[in-house]
Image (cartoon, rainbow, N blue to C red):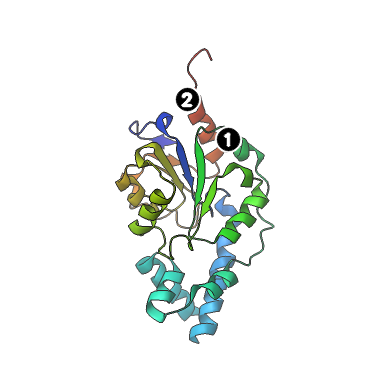
Amino acid sequence: MEFNPLNPLAAIDTWIFDLDNTLYPGTCELYREIEQRMAAFIMEELKLDHDGAHALRRRFLDRHGTTLRGLMLEYGLAPERFLDYVHEIDLSAVEEDVELGEAIANLPGRKLIFTNGTKRHAERVLGRLGLGAHFAAIHDIVACAYAPKPDPAAYAAFVTKYEIDPTRAAMIEDMARNLPPAAALGMTTIWVKGGPHSEDDGHTEHIHFIIEPNRLAPFLRAMMGRFIPAGE
């Protein structure tokens, strides 16, 4: 665990969690099925072969933040069919995480989900993890008007909707490139390594805490120790 002593977590009253590969480990590999379903959708919709579909998907991710955003901007695709199709995945690899649930429950303040997925997908995943009761709201790609992280407009709308003071908020993400806009607003940023994009370490100057794979619950428990005065 590495951390910057600035932005003390004791001041945090809003905890913002990404969903996929953050609340469950990247070793569940749900992203592989999601990527395959995205490619299958593109192959059918745009009449591309397998390699062409994956190449387009990767280009959209780099240029637009999500495959969906690229399809909307460059091909005028209506988003609902795509989202419904790609998120209809097998979640059997995701298991209840009692340890993480206890750690999240003990954090002071609000806990929110901020995801580039859909609310239905988030609810299904949280149900598998046993974490649904701990979160006050799910802010999904639809609520972002389909402007995904790391688009700064998505963060601005999110902060406004939930009346968040960014200087008293922490954002927890598996994609390092989604953290600079949060840091720019004044949030404390926490990067969970181990997801499919953990090789993307070019934005670590904006990160205050780095968590090794599968260490989110211990990290949150350790932070709780800082909130409790000695002798209590």
Residue nearest the observer in this picture, 32 or 126: 126
- 65 over 134 or under it: above or below: below
Q: Residue at x 43, y 76 (%)?
A: 71
Q: Quadrant of residue 4?
A: top left
Residue behind mark 1: 103
Residue density around tag 2, few if under 14, some if 14–19, many if 20 or more, within 10 Å: some
Counting from the top left corner in percent of width and height, residue 29 is at 58, 58
The correct choice, above or below, for 51 with respect to 180 in the image is: below
Name the element at disc 1.
helix
Q: Which of marks 2 and 1 is nearer the N terminus?
A: 1
* Visible residue check, residue 70: yes
Q: Residue furthest bottom?
A: 47
Identity of the amino acid at label 2? Answer: Phe
Residue 155 is situated, as x and y percent measured from the top left of the image, at 38, 53
Circles 2 and 1, Cβ within 8 Å, touching? The answer is no
Q: Quadrant of the N terminus?
A: top left
Q: Please report the residue visible at 42 percent of the width from the left and 29 percent of the height from the top.
A: 10
For marks 2 and 1, give the CA distance.
13 Å
- Determine the residue positioned at 62% across, 51% down: 126
Query: Which residue does the numbered mark 2 point to in the structure image?
Result: 227
